[in-house]
Image: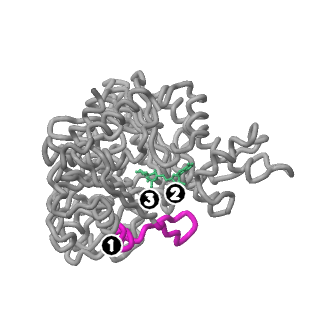
């Protein structure tokens, strides 16, 4: 851990000395792909109580990944109640809710009844792989790429360059939503009758929490769907028209730190304001105080997400890193560029299910007990390989197995593959983003693993700061919520970290 982060942690501990008895609290939630967490934060950003539950993914067919919305809702409500109880405070002391969510996981539902038409379709789901391949090879895409290349040549307009390199991926909502619109007659009918709502997890939770009275998303979540135009800051007419996504099903897009409406009193007994909706990676960026251009964060959770703050304008990209909105708060707009690897924690969970170890924490010692992996390599691609390879059909595999290969070699190869993917992403960042890197901060469950952290640091030849607490998405969401409810809350303590 770096001196700066250590100092910040210490200041936080000191400032939480029991001289004052804060009576207002903010909840920071992280609805991840593996774990749902809730922390209760006081005004000094100290965690007063917590609760977490494992997310149950459903795998109805090979390559399909879904989440049961009713189960997710029950868990979401339970972690809030349990965390508040663990903090020993009352619900009426909670002044704001900040919700960070896994992004690009979506659902559609009936506008009149609120009933969902299908499970959440996860960002890891591969059902649209064939659609992705055929769209990327289509005549329309060739014409689009050709026309925009030509326009860029004459105008030097960089947006044209970005469009000329745009391709679909299975991680984007776009073609998974097209698959739903084409294959579920109930959804098709609802769209025709103007009775269909589309939402990512944030939008659906807001709708449920407010019993249907609020329907919205924020810029960070919208920008991760694949059909939001970060240059014009609205849903992309070009992409929606091209693939026939009706505008009528899309929610309005709001600021990240914003009063989205109050939780219906029946749910927690009091009407708590929902004051921040944010994508989990953007939230982690905010929680780690990556506020300056060039600040980088590396999150290793279910997947790996490497993000760089690119300042006030979206980066023009080259096909590997993609431009995103970090957050928008009033006039303040922060943009990011992101690269990702889909399988990080998923590889650990998979190996655990095969009984290679019983607890993820054991993997570090298992890897360190060997000199090397004895030539065994693992390709972490249960959900294809993302940039720079962009192959949704790549499968996970071990290579170099020998008679002498033990489970220790397999585990070491898995951990090494995570570090190699980090190196590949970092090299791509340096190639594509012409902004000098200032700081690199890490978070997410897998950053508990010192072997992965050290190997990544050695491979990229950079110092990586690791904060004492890794739940940066929760902290970011709580800080954004704190900003919306007033200066007495968490935001002040977090801003202090940068001083
Ligand atoms: N010490 C460790 N070594 C390796 N992996 C770990 C370790 N501790 C936790 N993990 C992994 O971290 C993942 C969860 O990370 P988390 O950031 O909570 O995920 P998400 O936010 O995507 O739900 C799990 O796959 C878990 O196995
Ligand atoms: O669940 P995580 O933390 O790996 O994050 C998932 C991403 O938000 C998907 O875009």
| Mark positioned earlier in the residue sequence (1 or 2) | 2
238 displayed left or right of 20: right
Q: Where is residue 4, by image quadrant?
A: top left
Q: From where the camera sits, is residue 299 visible?
A: yes
Residue placed under numbered mark 2 in the picture: 129
- Name the spot of residue 87 as percent of width and height, x first: 29, 59
Check the image and report above or below for 257 versus 354: above
Residue 346: percent from the left, percent from the top? 55, 55
Q: Nearer the viewer, mark 3 or mark 2?
A: 3
- Judge whether 199 appears above or below 334 on screen: below
On the image, numbered disc 3 is attached to which residue? 35
Return the x and y of residue 115 as percentages of the image width and height: 28, 76
Q: Is mark 3 within 8 Å of ligand 1?
A: yes
Q: Local crowd at mark 2 within 10 Å, few (<14), some, or many (≥20)?
A: many
- Distance from the alpha carbon under mark 3 to that under mark 2: 26 Å
Quarter of image, res 358: bottom right
**Helix, strand or loop at disc 3?**
strand
Is disc 2 placed on a helix, strand or loop?
helix
The C terminus - image quarter: top left
Q: Which residue is mark 1?
A: 187
**Label 1, label 2: how far apart the Cα atoms are:** 21 Å
Q: Which residues are magenta?
A: 56-75
Q: Is residue 113 left or right of residue 372?
A: left
For marks 3 and 2 on the same chain, the one whose residue lies earlier in the sequence: 3
């Amino acid at each position: 851990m770096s001196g700066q982060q250590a100092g910040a942690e210490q200041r936080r501990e000191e400032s939480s000395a029991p001289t004052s008895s804060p009576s207002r609290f903010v909840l920071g939630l992280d609805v991840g792909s593996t774990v749902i967490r809730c922390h209760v934060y006081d005004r000094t950003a100290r965690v007063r109580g917590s609760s977490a539950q494992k997310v149950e993914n459903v795998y109805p067919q090979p390559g399909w990944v879904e989440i049961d919305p009713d189960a997710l809702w029950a868990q979401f409500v339970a972690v809030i109640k349990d965390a508040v109880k663990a903090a020993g405070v009352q619900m009426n002391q909670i002044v704001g809710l900040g919700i960070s969510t896994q992004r690009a996981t979506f659902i559609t539902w009936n506008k009149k009844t609120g009933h969902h038409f299908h499970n959440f379709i996860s960002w890891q789901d591969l059902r649209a792989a064939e659609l992705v391949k055929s769209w990327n090879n289509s005549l329309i895409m060739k014409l689009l790429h050709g026309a925009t290349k030509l326009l860029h040549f004459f105008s030097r307009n960089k947006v044209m360059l970005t469009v000329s390199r745009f391709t679909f991926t299975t991680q984007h909502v776009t073609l998974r939503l097209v698959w739903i619109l084409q294959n579920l007659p109930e959804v098709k009918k609802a769209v025709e009758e103007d009775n269909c709502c589309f939402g990512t997890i944030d939008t659906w939770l807001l709708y449920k929490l407010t019993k249907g009275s609020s329907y919205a998303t924020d810029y960070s979540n919208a920008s991760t769907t694949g059909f939001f135009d970060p240059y014009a800051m609205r849903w992309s007419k070009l992409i929606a028209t091209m693939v026939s996504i009706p505008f009528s099903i899309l929610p309005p897009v709001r600021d990240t730190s914003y009063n989205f409406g109050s939780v219906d009193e029946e749910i927690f007994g009091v009407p708590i304001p929902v004051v921040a909706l944010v994508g989990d990676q953007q939230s982690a960026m905010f929680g780690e105080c990556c506020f300056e251009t060039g600040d980088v964060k590396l999150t290793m959770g279910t997947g790996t997400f490497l993000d760089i703050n690119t300042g006030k304008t979206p980066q023009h990209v080259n096909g590997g890193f993609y431009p995103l909105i970090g957050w928008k708060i009033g006039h303040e707009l922060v943009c990011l560029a992101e690269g990702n690897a889909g399988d990080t924690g998923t590889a650990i969970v998979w190996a655990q299910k095969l009984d290679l170890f019983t607890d993820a924490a054991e993997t570090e010692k298992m890897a360190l007990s060997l000199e090397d992996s004895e030539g065994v390599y693992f390709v972490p691609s249960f959900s294809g390989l993302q940039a720079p390879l962009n192959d949704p059909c790549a499968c996970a595999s071990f290579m170099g197995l020998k008679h002498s290969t033990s489970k220790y070699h397999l585990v070491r190869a898995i951990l090494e593959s995570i570090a190699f993917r980090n190196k590949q992403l970092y090299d791509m960042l340096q190639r594509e983003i012409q902004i000098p890197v200032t700081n690199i901060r890490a978070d997410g469950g897998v950053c508990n693993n010192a072997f992965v952290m050290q190997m990544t640091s050695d491979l990229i030849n950079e110092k990586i700061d690791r904060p004492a607490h890794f739940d940066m998405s929760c902290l970011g969401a709580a800080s954004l919520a704190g900003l919306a409810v007033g200066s007495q809350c968490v935001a002040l303590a977090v801003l202090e970290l940068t001083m």
